[in-house]
C-alpha cells in the first residue's frame, strides 16, 4: 500500500462529531462514518432512485445506488494511488447523492420550482439535512452524527460556496446559499470560503468520471444512439477507435464495455497527471494547505475539461434531451408537482409519522416538511402515492 501523503486527512486529527467519541475500538472515525452511511435508510432508498431512466424501464440501467458504488470504486482507487485517506474518500463518495429526489434531475427541478417561495431545493443541502436531522435511527441524536470532515466534504466537494470577503460563488449568486447549510455552518463552522479536503475533491471528480462514462453505457443499452455515433466525439471516439483497432470484430456488448472502459481510463489517467502537477506547484505540508489553495488540487487538465464539455454536449443532444427521455421526465416532474400541491393543501394526507403539529399555520415549515417527505421518496413510492391519490398511472396518462 502506498505511503500516506503528508496532506492526507488523518483520522487521529479529526475535528470530531457532535455526539460521542470520534471513532471506536474497531473502527477509525471515517470508517465509522462510512458504515453509518451504508446502514442509513437514505442510502438504501438510492436503489430505486433514477439516474436517467425511471426504475420500470429496465433492470440494467444505473440507479443512484449503483452509481454511488461505482463512484466509490473510482474514488478509492484514486485515493490509494495519491496517498490520501481511503475511508474518508469512500464515505464521501457513497454519501454524495443522498439528497437527490426521485426521478433524477427532473424531480429536482420540479421540487425546486415548488419550493421557490420557501427557499428552493438543493440536493447538497438536502444531503446535509438527511445526515444531521432527518435520519432517525439512533437513540441519542437525530441524523448520523458524522465527523466534521465528512460534513465539510458533503457541502463543499464542488468547491467553496463564497470567497474570503463573503461574496457568493457563481452557483449561489442567484438564489443564495441554502438555509440548511448556512444555519448549520453557523453552529458547526464548515469554513464555506475554503476548498474541501483532497479526499472530498477526489470524490467529486470521481462522480464526474463515473457519470460521464456510464451515461454512455446506459444510452447505448437503451439504443438512444449507436456506437458509431461516438466516432466524432474526441474522448469517446478515441476510446472506440482504440477498441476497434485492437479487436476489429468485437461483438456489440463487449465493444460498448471496452469503449466505456477506455473513456474511464483516459479520465483517471488525466486526473492523476494533472493533480501531480498541481501538487508539485503547491507543495502542501498539511490538509490545511489543500483547503486554502487558490484552486482545486484534484482536477482534470484543461484539455480533458474541453473533451468532457464536448462529451456532455453529445450526451445532452443524444440522450438527456432525447424525445423518449424528455417525455418520461416531463411526466415525472408533474408527479412531483402534483404530490407537493396535494400535501400542501391537505397535510393530513401525509403518513401519520410526518404529521407534525408545529407546522400548522406556518407555510414555510409546512413546505419544508412536504419537501423533505417527497425528496426522500423512491421513484416507485412516488408513483404509488400518486396513483393512490389520483387513481391513475402517473407516467402513462
Image (cartoon, helix red, strand yellow):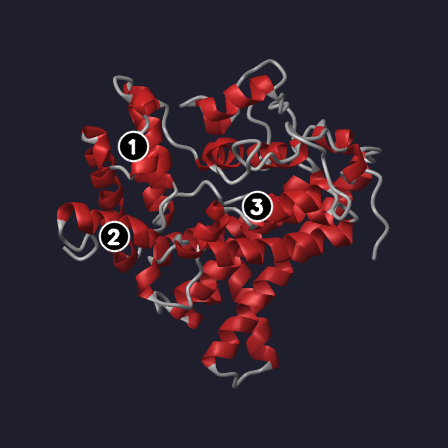
1 and 2 marks in contact (CB < 8 Å): no
Q: Residue at x 43, y 33 (%)?
A: 122
Specify few, some or many for label 1: CA neighbours under 10 Å numbering under 14, 14-19, or 20 or more. Answer: some
45 and 213: which is toward the camera: 45
Indicate which label's residue lies in the foreground, 1 or 2: 2
Is residue 266 in view from this perspective? Answer: yes
Q: Which type of secondary structure does the marked residue at label 2 adopt?
A: helix
Q: Which type of secondary structure does the marked residue at label 3 adopt?
A: helix
- Residue 96 in the image: state x and y as whole percent: 54, 44
Q: Residue furthest top?
A: 165
In the image, residue 217 sits, relative to residue 46, either above or below, namely below
Circle 1 residue: 113
Circle 2 residue: 384
Kindly report the distance in space between the C-alpha atoms of the residues bearing marks 1 and 3: 29 Å
Q: Residue at x 70, y 48 (%)?
A: 87
- The answer to which of marks 1 and 3 sits earlier in the sequence is 3
Amino acid at each position: 500500500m502506498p505511503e500516506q501523503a503528508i496532506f492526507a486527512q488523518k483520522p487521529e486529527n479529526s475535528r470530531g462529531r457532535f455526539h460521542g467519541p470520534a471513532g471506536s475500538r474497531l473502527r477509525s472515525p471515517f470508517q465509522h462514518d462510512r458504515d453509518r452511511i451504508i446502514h442509513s435508510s437514505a442510502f438504501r432508498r438510492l436503489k430505486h432512485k433514477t439516474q436517467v431512466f425511471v426504475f420500470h424501464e429496465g433492470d440494467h440501467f444505473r440507479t443512484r445506488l449503483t452509481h454511488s458504488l461505482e463512484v466509490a470504486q473510482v474514488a478509492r482507487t484514486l485515493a490509494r494511488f495519491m496517498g490520501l485517506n481511503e475511508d474518508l474518500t469512500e464515505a464521501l463518495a457513497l454519501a454524495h447523492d443522498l439528497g437527490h429526489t426521485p426521478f433524477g434531475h427532473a424531480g429536482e427541478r420540479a421540487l425546486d420550482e415548488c419550493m421557490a417561495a420557501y427557499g428552493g431545493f438543493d440536493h447538497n443541502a438536502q444531503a446535509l439535512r438527511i445526515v444531521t436531522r432527518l435520519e432517525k435511527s439512533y437513540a441519542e441524536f437525530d441524523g448520523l452524527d458524522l465527523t466534521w470532515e465528512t460534513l465539510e466534504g458533503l457541502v463543499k466537494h464542488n468547491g467553496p460556496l463564497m470567497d474570503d470577503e463573503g461574496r457568493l460563488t457563481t452557483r449561489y449568486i442567484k438564489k443564495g446559499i441554502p438555509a440548511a447549510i448556512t444555519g448549520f455552518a453557523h453552529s458547526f463552522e464548515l469554513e464555506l470560503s475554503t476548498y474541501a479536503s483532497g479526499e472530498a475533491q477526489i470524490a467529486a471528480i470521481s462522480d464526474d468520471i463515473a457519470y460521464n462514462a456510464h451515461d454512455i453505457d446506459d444510452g447505448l443499452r437503451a439504443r438512444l444512439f449507436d456506437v458509431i455515433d461516438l466516432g466524432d466525439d474526441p474522448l469517446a471516439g478515441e476510446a472506440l477507435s482504440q477498441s476497434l483497432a485492437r479487436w476489429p470484430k468485437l461483438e456489440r456488448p463487449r465493444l460498448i464495455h471496452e469503449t466505456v472502459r477506455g473513456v474511464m481510463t483516459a479520465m483517471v489517467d488525466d486526473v492523476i497527471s494533472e493533480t501531480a502537477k498541481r501538487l508539485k506547484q503547491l507543495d502542501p505540508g498539511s490538509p490545511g494547505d489543500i483547503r486554502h489553495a487558490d484552486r482545486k488540487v484534484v482536477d482534470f487538465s484543461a484539455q480533458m475539461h474541453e473533451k468532457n464539455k464536448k462529451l456532455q454536449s453529445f450526451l445532452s443532444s443524444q440522450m438527456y434531451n432525447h424525445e423518449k427521455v424528455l417525455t418520461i421526465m416531463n411526466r415525472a416532474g408533474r408527479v412531483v408537482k402534483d404530490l407537493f400541491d396535494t400535501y400542501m393543501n391537505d397535510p393530513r394526507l401525509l403518513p401519520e409519522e410526518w404529521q407534525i403539529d408545529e407546522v400548522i399555520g406556518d407555510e414555510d415549515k409546512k413546505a419544508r416538511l412536504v419537501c423533505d417527505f417527497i425528496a426522500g421518496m423512491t421513484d416507485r413510492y412516488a408513483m404509488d402515492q400518486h396513483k393512490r391519490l389520483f387513481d391513475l398511472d402517473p407516467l402513462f396518462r
